[in-house]
Image (tube, rainbow, N blue to C red):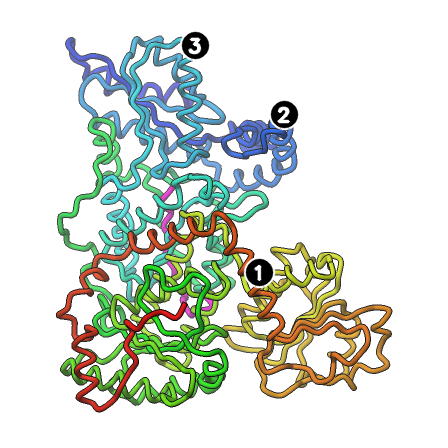
Amino acid sequence: MSRTGSFQERYRSNSDGATGEAARPRGVLLVNIGTPASPDVPAVRRYLAEFLSDPMVIRLPRSMRWFQHSLGRLIAQWRGPRSAEKYRLIWTDRGSPLRAIMEDQAVALAERLPKGWRVFLGMRYGRPSISDTLREITSLGIEELVVVPLYPHFSQTTTGTVVHEMYRVLREEAMHINVSARTTWYDDAGYVNGQAHLIADYARSRGLCPNNVFLLISAHGLPVSYTRRGDPYARQVRRSVDLIVERLGWPAERHSLAFQSRMGPGEWLKPDLQTALKDLANKGERRVLVCPISFAVDCLDTLEEIHIRAREDFATLDGELFVCPALNTYGRFIDALKNLVIRGPQPVSSKPHTPLFATAVKDETPDSGLDTLVMIGAALPSRVGAGRGPRLVYSEPTALARAKKSHHEVMDFLESLRSEDYIREALIWNTCYRFECYAWLASEGSGSDQDCAVVRLRNELFDVKAPGLRVNTLFGADAWHHAMRTIAGLNSGLPGDKDVVEQFQTACRLAERAGMAGGHAHALVNEAISVAHSVREETSWGRLDLGYCFAAITRIQHAFPLKPANLRHVVIGGSTTSRSIIQTLYEQFSVKESAVTLVYRNHQGSQMKLLRKTVGHCRRLRTQSYAQRAVIEAIADADVVYFGIDCEEPVLSADSFRGLRRFDEHPLFVLDFNTSGSTEGLEALAGVQLWRAELIDTEVEAYAESTCAGEEFPRSVHEAEVWIADHTPRQIKMDLNPSCHLHRENGNAARARCGEVIEPATAKSET
């Protein structure tokens, strides 16, 4: 008997035998993406051609729709051999794993459904097709049909195209069936509970818990352009993650979300799985549990991409990867499917429940640090202003520059806090626009003790008598809200500045090296990064996906004009700025790796690991001094030079370049991002165009002005502000209660008793 015939017998026998005389025949159609008939290249090409020709999967401009099917066939022809090899790695005695598991799901579901129900399978691409299955259902006289696309999260590329195809067939073939489609069940209580229990069961069976493994939740990727057009997929995935993690009771700083299965060019949801695993390895995580939550059935994307490829890649990083299976025929999930069919999705209730992992990481995963969180810092005015955030006072640029500390001074300061009993954790956000310290005070002692600790910390950070320096002090919810607005790019001179995300991560890494970043700091950073990604993906604010380096290079290339893709570039320095410059050249200006040279001195630490990952295969020149001959020659051969170093003394002088080349015949463009200046006398050389940091600031400011002048800008700001306010966690809102130890009014009185004066955070904004 054929495999298909055997399946028909298995899933029908229970239903047919149980059907009573009065029962009306009803059907359930489980639909998934599909699978090739065999792992051979021709079969895989046929499957891919059908899949990639779907205009709801690959969206072409209206003027290019005529090319849709030809494009699908071309891509299938190219990808066929490689995909066939992947399918061969996972193929089973029963054939395609996805098809075999779906057959088992249908059998298990049929056994749980009441009398009179039949279960059918359909594939959006491949066989059995939706049209063939609907014809079979009609021939059996079934007039009521529940369709369940096996995708918990709605996307036009998955559930959307299934529903579209189903109604196309019903309409064109005049089928008379009463259809109900379960198109969205990302927050269904049965699905959430089943997924959480599956993860817990798998973890416990291998002795895993939050103490000894990092939980990385994986979901299928999607082009960012789709989410900006209104596709709710990303938002629903993040909501599912929140619900599942809450049900598990897994600590916030011990889990994260990544997206996989990227296909084709363009920007996709981030972070991708491969990058997330490398970042975890760089942070010292050696055991990671990956759980795919957007796949109800194990398939190529889980069995080959995660079980095989990701596990091998992580092993090369000295890590051990555990992979939780998809829901498949897990009992709780089959029960959830039954309820989904009969009743429809039932959102998770707010009723309290006992977490599956009731014991979190002791002493490392505090439930909340808001009652002891304080932000003390100075900043320059932003283009957006305070908006819905806390009221701020702003400093003069020269005053802020004098108050800031160098990288090494910040490190020394954080290390000095380790011996202080009044500070539990701290990190310092040190950028050109802000110098802010986020600290968690010791929870022991009275409110007045904590307020005196704030005064002490402020005085150690800042000279209160510095003219033009205005220091803000924010507590609890205000400090949290300020951090979220800042990392979303609302508190920067360049609206939508995405560089602040990397800057905040760098601040946490530095604090970690100093021994001052624990559970509180990592939780705040992870939450801020999640907000930054979400607010960009789910609102029009994401269109302002800008960076300081991008704005600077854009302005300067338009002024001359330059075509960066046709030039040779030298980037000097191993800083975060250098990494941003290189990433901008690659991603925004299509500069090839072979056209970039990186010159750096330091060669170890997490920053250099991240830098090496960014630069790829560009030429790298490590040196003991930027004045060495090899560096001078590299600059002399370049068209554009970028200084991304942080040094108070010039590292290169004009004398170093004399006689190397005729700059008047072959101009050299120099962008010096170092606020202290990296060169001396270079502007005196004919043919050398030098932009110092102040001039770059002016160009970026002009770019920011043009951005703010756009008609859509006010609406984008409003959407971002509302999104952050609407997604404020419950514990943050509760922290606004006046009984909080660090409530502003009580704090002012305590500070007065200490004999110190701190400028109130409620002062009128100067913007």
Helix, strand or loop at disc 2?
Answer: helix
Q: What type is the residue that disc 1 sits on?
A: Tyr
Whole-percent x, y for residue 607 in the image: 52, 73
Marks 1 and 2 close (CB-CB < 8 Å)? no
Helix, strand or loop at disc 3?
Answer: loop
Q: Gap in Å between the C-alphas at discs 3 and 1? A: 56 Å
First reached walking from the N terminus: tag 1 or tag 2: 2
Q: Which residue is mark 1?
A: 703
Q: Which mark is residue 66?
A: 2
Q: Which mark is residue 173?
A: 3
Confirm whether the magenta stretch covers residue 27. no
- Up-down: is 408 above or below 199? below
Q: Gap in Å between the C-alphas at discs 3 and 2? A: 25 Å
Q: What type is the residue that disc 2 sits on?
A: Trp
Q: What residue lies at 15% left-to-right and 65% top-to-bottom? A: 737
Q: Is residue 185 visible?
A: yes
Q: What type is the residue that disc 3 sits on?
A: Glu
Q: Nearer the viewer, residue 274 or 37?
A: 274
Q: Which residues are magenta?
A: 281-294
How many callouts does the rendering have?
A: 3
- Up-down: is 176 above or below 340? above
